[in-house]
Image (tube, helix red, strand yellow):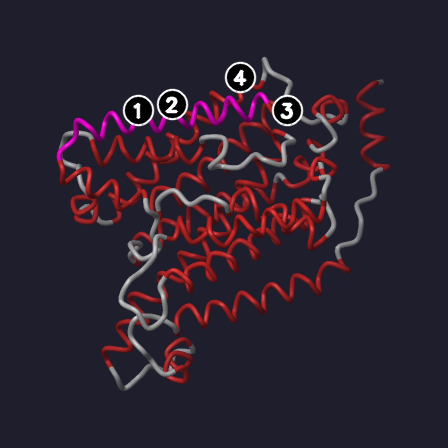
Amino acid sequence: MQRTSSIDTRQEIKLPSLAPKLSWMLALITLLILFLVLDVALGSVNIPFTEVVAILVGKGSDNIAWLKIVETIRVPKAFTAILAGAALAVSGLQMQTLFRNPLAGPSVLGISAGASLGVAVVMLSSGFVTTSFALRQLGIGGSWLIILASTLGSAFILLIIIGISLRINDNVVLLIVGLMIANLTIAMVSIWQYFSSPEQIQDYLLWTFGSLGGVTQQHLKVLSISVGVGVLITFISSKYLNLLLMGENYASSMGLNLKKIKILIILSTSLLAGAVTGFCGPIGFVGIAVPHLCRSLFNTSDHRVLIPSACLMGACIMLFCDIIAQIPGHQSTLPINSVTAIIGSPVVIWVIIQRKNLKGAF
């Protein structure tokens, strides 16, 4: 009888039309293409814009050096930015929905720190796989090893936080617990660094600065598969994420299996945040800020809209940050982790001031 009532209630729910959101989606897609071309065109080596466009559309170039730079360096870096931005934004969106907390995100709750711990286990441990050079020698196998280590590390921390959340109902307290776990994880890695050799520490420190340029074409294939699977799982779960926004009790009464959906969220979030952190280093701001920007722009909490918009918005922001980070016309490159924080923090503050009631979306 109760099950029949739940089914009837589900049938009564009418989701709003997505048609009014399409214009904003098209605007984001246009912005993404513009930033992609600019990111490939700008860099330390000055390449004419027409030559860059010709290479991108497959017409090639008479200048072999320009062709090599665009095809083997700039294009993989730009697509890495797109994948990293989309993955971090979607993982942050899932965390904010799961914990119903506007401040939740992969970096705040310690998930990125957990991924860092997984990478540290690989890069700082003794054995045949000890440095990034050795990992590159392993080729595709080394890529999957990094993905596996960072995903397991982030999943481990996420499971601890969810275990604690079963005992704590206060989201603010849970957030503080997440920050403490992140600090504990970072402290463990720091102690490990203290007892490691200078070569291992140097590799690991460079990785912690965050970089999109270290991802090779082989790495990009692995990263694309991981992010694609993670986003697909999230999109399949969109209607369940909508139900979670109404509270776990209400979601259960609607027939939602909370245990299964939480496992799905843990799996996809760990895969998305772990893959990006493993290859690009810890990157803050994007995971926590982009979901809020999307809610403000589209004025909705519907995950059928938020998931694709977070992918597009996260990709646009990462491309823009990468354009700034590479300092066009200069040989130096800024750490992407610092650029996202410098550009993103004022944006987040502006959104918070404008909306005033972020908790209203949860």
The residue where tag 1 is placed is 188
Q: Position of residue 24 (x, y in %)?
A: 68, 62
Indicate left or right for 120 with 328 as reference: left
Circle 4 packing at 10 Å, graded few (<14), some (14-19), many (20+), is some
Q: Is residue 107 above or below residue 251?
A: below
Give the amino acid at mark 3: Leu
User: Camera-side residue: 217 or 174?
Assistant: 174
- In this view, 286 is above or below 158: below
Look at 81% across and 29% down and name the residue there: 7
Q: Are marks 2 and 1 in contact (CB under 8 Å)?
A: yes
Q: Earlier in the sequence, mark 2 or mark 3?
A: 2
Predominant secondary structure, magenta span: helix
Q: Earlier in the sequence, mark 4 or mark 2?
A: 4
Residue under label 3: 258
Distance between mark 4 and mark 1 Cα atoms: 20 Å
**Is 62 a magenta residue?**
no
Marks 2 and 3, Cα distance to the nearest angstrom?
A: 29 Å
Q: Within the image, what quadrant is residue 114 found in?
A: top left
Q: Which mark is residue 184?
A: 2
What distance separates the C-alpha of mark 3 from that of mark 1?
Answer: 32 Å
Q: Mark 2 Cα within 10 Å, few/some/many (few <14, many 20+)?
A: some
